[in-house]
Amino acid sequence: MNQPNSRPTSELLLRETASQTAGPYVHIGLALAAAGNPTRDEEIWNEMARPGAEGEHIEVVGTVIDGNGDLVRDAFIEAWQADANGEYQQEFDLEKPFNSFGRTATTFDHGSEWTLKTVKPGSVAHASGQVQAPHINLSIFARGINIHLQTRLYFEDEAKANAACPVLSRIESPTRRQTLIARREEVDGKVRYRLDIRLQGEGETVFFDF
Amino acid sequence: MEMQYNKRFVARDRNWHPPAYAPGYKTSVARSPQQALVSMQKPTASELSGPDFRHLRMGPHDNDLLLNFRQEQGQGLPQGERIIMFGRVVDQFGKPVPHTLVEMWQANAGGRYRHRNDNYLAPLDPNFGGVGRCLTDDQGWYRFRTIKPGPYPWPNDPNSWRPSHIHVSVMGPSISTRLITQMYFEGDPLIPLCPIVHTLKDPEAVETMIGRLDMARSKPMDCLAYRFDLVVRGELQTFFENQ
C-alpha cells in the first residue's frame, strides 16, 4: 500500500507538456552540423572530452536500426555520463576539457553511424550502497519515436563490474542484458566501443523508464 | 556527494504521453519497441542529474529568427507573419525552471524546412534558417521572435497535412525532465486532423501543446504574440533513509 503522499494525485499537479516526435528534421534544430547547416559559435556536440581530459580517451560509435533491419538515418542522440572519477560534471562549459553531456546523430551518409569522443566513465555509486558499472546514459529521438527512448551503454571489458551492477541486474533476461554491452575494438591504436541500438524485434535494445 | 541527488521526480504518466506504437502515424510502426520498458525502481545519480547550460554562450540573435539567418547584414527579412513566441518553463508544482535551455526549429512561412531531405515545392527563404535557442531567465521565462510556419503536406496518408507547428526542446533540471514537443497554434483547423497530434489519446494532453494568441504581448504594427508555457516533471523533495 502506498504511504500517504508518496504518490501525489494528479489533481494537485500540473500535467507535463505532452511529448511529440522530434520529426525528420531534428538535425536542423539540434544537430546543425549533421544537417549540413551553418553552426553557431558554441554548439553542444559530440566532443565530450578534449585532449586535456583526465582518463582513458575512447570513441563510442553505433547505428540505430528499425524493426525492418534498416538503418535509421535521421536519429538524434544525447549522452550523459560520469567523468573518469565517477563524478557528473553538471556545469556544461565548452572551455572545460570534459563535459558529461554530449550530442550526436546518425547521418545520411554510408554506414549512418553516430559517434561520441569521450573518456571511459568511472563507476557511479548507487543508493543501495552498491556500485554501478561504468555506463553512459543515451536518449534516442527520431521521426516516428513519439517520446524519446532511454537506454544505457555498458562496456564489454568491464565484465566483473557489469555482473555486479544493480541496474544491469534488474534486467532479468541475460540475453537482453547483452543489448546494452558495447563491443571493444581497436582501430589505428585507438580504443573504440560499438553499440548498435535496435528499436524493435530481434535483439531489441533494453529501454528504461525512470 | 550522493546527497545532492536526494531527489526524485514525479513519475512520468505514460498514458498521457503518446504510446510508442501508434499505427495512425505510420513511421512509429517499425520504430516502436515491442518489449516493456524496464522501470528503474530507484533512479540513480545517472538519471537524476543533468547538464546545466548557464555557461553556454548564446549569440546575440540566437533567439531571433527574424535576424539570425539574414543573408546580408542589415538587409533582407524573412517572409511571413512575424510573431513573438514566449512563455514560462515551470515544473508540475508550478515552480519556475530558471536558466534552462529551450531550443526550437521550424519550417518557413511556405511550410519548407532548411533540410536537404525536404523537397516540398514551396521555396526556401534565403533569409530564414528556422532554428533558435535561448536560456530561461531567473523566473523561467523564454522568448523567441520568428515567423509563423506554414502547414505542409506529408506522405502519411494520401492527403495528410501538418498543422503549423514549432518543434520545442527543453532540458529542465535533469535528464529525467528532458522533453521534446511541438507548439501548435490556437484555432488551427488542421490540428484535429493531424495523425501526429492523434498519437495522444487524451484531448487535454493536446491542449498542453497549443500556443495561445496574446494580444497584450503583441507589438502593434509589428508582431503578434503567442504564449506557450512548458511544464516539465516536478521534483519531489523527499528524503529516503538509505541515501
Image (tube, coloured by chain):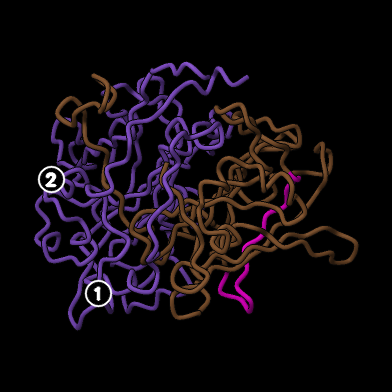
Residue A60, image x and y in percent?
Answer: 70, 57
Q: Is residue A117 magenta?
A: yes
Which mark identifies residue B153?
1
Q: Viewed as shown, does residue B163 lie left or right of B77? A: left
- Marks 1 & 2, CB-CB < 8 Å contact: no
Q: Is residue A112 magenta?
A: yes
Residue at 49 percent of width and 64 percent of height? A75
Q: Amino acid at mark 2?
A: Glu
Q: Which residue is mark 2?
A: B204
Q: Chain of mark 2?
A: B
Furthest residue in direction right, as rendered: A189
Q: Viewed as shown, does residue B234 lie left or right of B127? A: left
Q: Nearer the viewer, residue B190 or B132?
A: B190
Tell me which chain appears brown: A
The magenta region covers A107-120
Q: What colour do you see for chain B?
A: purple
Q: Is residue B64 visible?
A: no
